Amino acid sequence: MSFFTKKYFFILTFALLSIQSYFYLDHISSDYKLINEYRYMDEITLLNGNEVSNKEYINNNLLFNPEVQEKFSSTSNIFFKDKKGIGLHFKNLMEPLIMEKYKQQSYSYILKDYNAHLPNISYNKHKNILFSDYLLLDYYKDLTSQYVTDDGSIETGFAEYPMFQAASIEKLKEKMDFIRFNIYEQNIQLFDRYYIHENSFILSPINEMKLGRDKGEIFSQYGFFSVMIVDKIMDVYGGFSINNYEKAKKTIDLIYYFIAIVFIFYFFKDNHLRLIFILFSGIAFFSIGHYSFIYAPNVTSFKHLLDLLIVLLFFKYSGTFKTIVLILIALLSILSLWISKDFGEFIFLATLGAFILPFGVTIIRTKRIDKRHLFFMCLILFTAILSLKFYPLMENPSIRYFFDGFYSFPFSSNILYFLVLIVVFLQWLFLFCFYQKLEEKKYLFSYIFLLFYTEFLFTYFIWSASIHALISYLFIYALPLMIIYNLFDFRYKNYFSLSIIFILTIGYSYSAYTFIQGKINYNDIFKTHKLYQWDNKRAGGILSTYSFADFQNSIDLIKKYNPETKFYMISKYDNILGIFSEKYSGFPFFELRSTIVTKYEYQKIKQIIEQNANLLFVDNDIDKDFLEEMNQMSYFDIEPYWRNESWKQRIPKLQTLKNLFNEVKDNYELVEKGTLISVYRKK
C-alpha cells in the first residue's frame, strides 16, 4: 500500500515535471545570453548612472600598487555577512556593508554578523613580492625571516595589504560595486576557455559539414550523430546559429527527460520508486549548477540518449528470444556508437555484457550452448566492429591525453573513490545473491546492463575526481539499487520508502535553490553592463556584454583576402571566427591553443603552415608580454588560486601560439592590420 493516493501522487509528479521542464523551456524560448570571456576585449559597466570602460577603470583605479596609501580600504571599511569568511567568490559576491571607522562603533550590533572582510594580499614590501609568487620561487625562501625596520621595530616577512583603497567612502563604494558587477566575468577571462571553447566542439564540426569538408578530416569531441541531431533540430528552429544551437541542446535534454519519465512508469509499478527516481533525476539536473547548464555541452543528454530505452527493452526481453526486441536492443546499442563514441562504447559493451553473462550461466546450468544466442552475440559484435571501422569523423586525438593525464589527473586521495568501490562491490554481490530472484522478476538483463554501464560511467568520475561527475548521472547510478529494493516486500517498506523520499526532497530543494541562485547571479550581469545584440546570422541575435564589432571587422578581413572555404589562422579567436566567417581551418583542429599538447602537434601544425599557408591570419597581440601582464595585477588576479590557474591554463597556451608564429613569421609579410587580427602573405 502506498502512502500516496493516485491523485496526490500524480499532482506531485506533475509539479516536479513542471519545475524541471520550465528551465528547459525558458532556455529554449529566450535569446541566449553570453558574457565576455575574452580577457583582451573591452566591455562597458553601468556604474552610478555612467557608462564606464572596464579597461580604463581597472587601469585607473584597481591596479595593485603597494606605494599608495589612502584613507579608506578593503581591510578596514568593507564587511560581509559571512560567518565562514568566504568573502570574495567569483560566482556570488554578496552585498557588502561599507562605512567609516567612526560609524563602526555605533553599528557594532550589526557588525557582529558582518565579520568577514574582503580577502587581503600577503605582501612583502622589502622584496616587492606577493606571498602567492613567493610560493613559486625557491630563491625567496629567506622571506620568512624577520626584518628590522628603520625605526627599530621588527616586522615579519609578509604583512596583509589592502586589495584596494580610496580617498573617500563614496569612491570605495563605487569600487566595490565595480568589483561585484565584474567579478564573475573577470575570473572566467583568466581561464579564457569557456563557452566558445566548449561549444565549438559541436558548432565547428557542423560548420565544416555544411561547407563540404571531407568527414574524415573533421575533428569532433562528440559523435557524428550527436552533431547531426543538433544540426537537424537547429534547422527546425530556423538554421545554424548559436541561438538555435542552444535551443537544440535543451530540446534534446527535454526529450530525454520525458523518455526518463515514461521509462520509470513502465519499469516500476511502485509509486514510491517512481517518485524516488524522479527526485534523483531532479537532483542530478539541479546539482550540475546553472553555470554548467548554460555553458557546458558535456552535460547535454545526447551523449547517452538511448541508454534508458535499452534498459526498458531488456526488461521487455527478459531472457526470452523475442527477435524484434533483440534487434531493437542491438540497433540502439550500435547507434549509440555513432551518437557518441565514448558513451556509445560504454552502452555497447554493457549491452554485450548483459547477453554474455547470462549466456555463460545458462551453459553452466544446462551444459548446453544456445546457438541462437551465440549467433546473435557474434553478429552484433561484428556489426559494432564495422560501425567503428567506418565511423565517418576523424579519430578524437584528445582521448589519449585524458589517459596520459594531460587534461586531467586520474588519481588522488579522495574518500569518494572508496564509496564508488563499495557501490561496485555491492552491485556484484547483489547479482550473486539475488540472481534467481532477478530472473523471476524479469529484471536480470536490465540489472546486468546497468551494472556494467554504471561501472563504465564511473570512469568519468575517476578522471575528474569530482562529486559533480557522480551526481550528473545520479538517477542512472541509483537504478541498480532500486531494482534490488523493488525485489522485496517487508513489513515497514512503505515507511522506509517515505524516509528516502523525505531525504531526497531535502536534497532536491537545496540543489534547486542553489541552481536558481546561480541563475539570478548570472542574469544580474546583464543588468549591470551595456548589452549588445549580435545580428550576425551565425550568432542568431544572442545578447552579450561585449560588442560584435571587433569580430565583424575580422570576418570582413578574412572574406576580403580569403575567398576559399579553407583558411589558416594562429589566433585565440580561431574557434569562433571560422564559424562566423563560414570558413574552416586548414589545420586538423579548429582550435590550436587547446589541441597543441605535445611537440608532435606543434611540429605538425608548423609543417602545414610552411607547406600550405600562403595567407596567414594572426592575432595583433600575438607578441604580448605575458610576464608584464601577470606583474600588472588588478584585484581580480590577486587571489592565489585563480592567478596560478591562469598561469597553468591560459598563459602557456597563448605562449605556444606566440612561439609558433615567431618560428614562421620570417617567411611572411604584413598585408593589412585589422582590429583583432592581421593578414600576412608568404614572401
Image (spheres, helix red, strand yellow):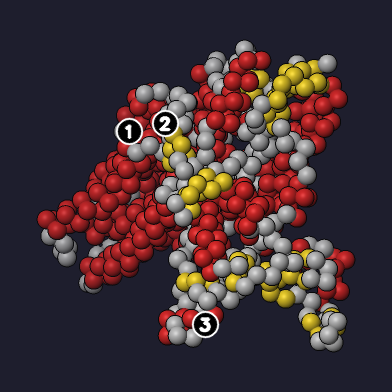
For label 1, the SS is helix
Pick the quarter of the image with the C terminus: top right
Residue receiving disc 2: 541
Please state which of residues 256 and 630 is positioned toward the viewer in this rendering: 630
Mark-to-mark CA distance, 1 and 3: 79 Å
Query: Which residue sits at x=24%, y=60%?
Result: 272
Badge 1 or badge 3: first in the primary sequence: 3
Residue receiving disc 1: 325
For marks 2 and 1, give the one nearer the viewer.
2
Q: Is residue 451 left or right of residue 667?
A: left
Mark-to-mark CA distance, 2 and 1: 45 Å
Q: Is residue 59 left or right of residue 503?
A: right
Amino acid type shown at disc 3: Tyr
Mark-to-mark CA distance, 3 and 2: 51 Å
Q: How many marks?
A: 3
Badge 3 or badge 2: first in the primary sequence: 3
Q: Give the class, few, some or many, for how many residues have Cα within 10 Å of label 2's Cα (few <14, many ≥20).
A: some
Badge 2 or badge 1: first in the primary sequence: 1
For label 3, the SS is helix
- Toward which corner of the image does residue 40 lie, by quadrant? top right
Q: Is residue 136 left or right of residue 298?
A: right
| 479, above or below 675, in the image | below
Amino acid type shown at disc 2: Gly
Amino acid type shown at disc 1: Val
| Residue 488, horizontal then vertical, whole percent | 28, 63
| Residue 654, horizontal then vertical, whole percent | 72, 41
- Toward which corner of the image does residue 659 lie, by quadrant? top right
Query: Which residue sits at x=37%, y=46%?
Result: 446
Identify the disc placed on residue 102: 3
| 423, above or below 150, in the image | above
Q: Residue furthest top?
A: 563
- Toward which corner of the image does residue 506 lie, by quadrant? bottom left
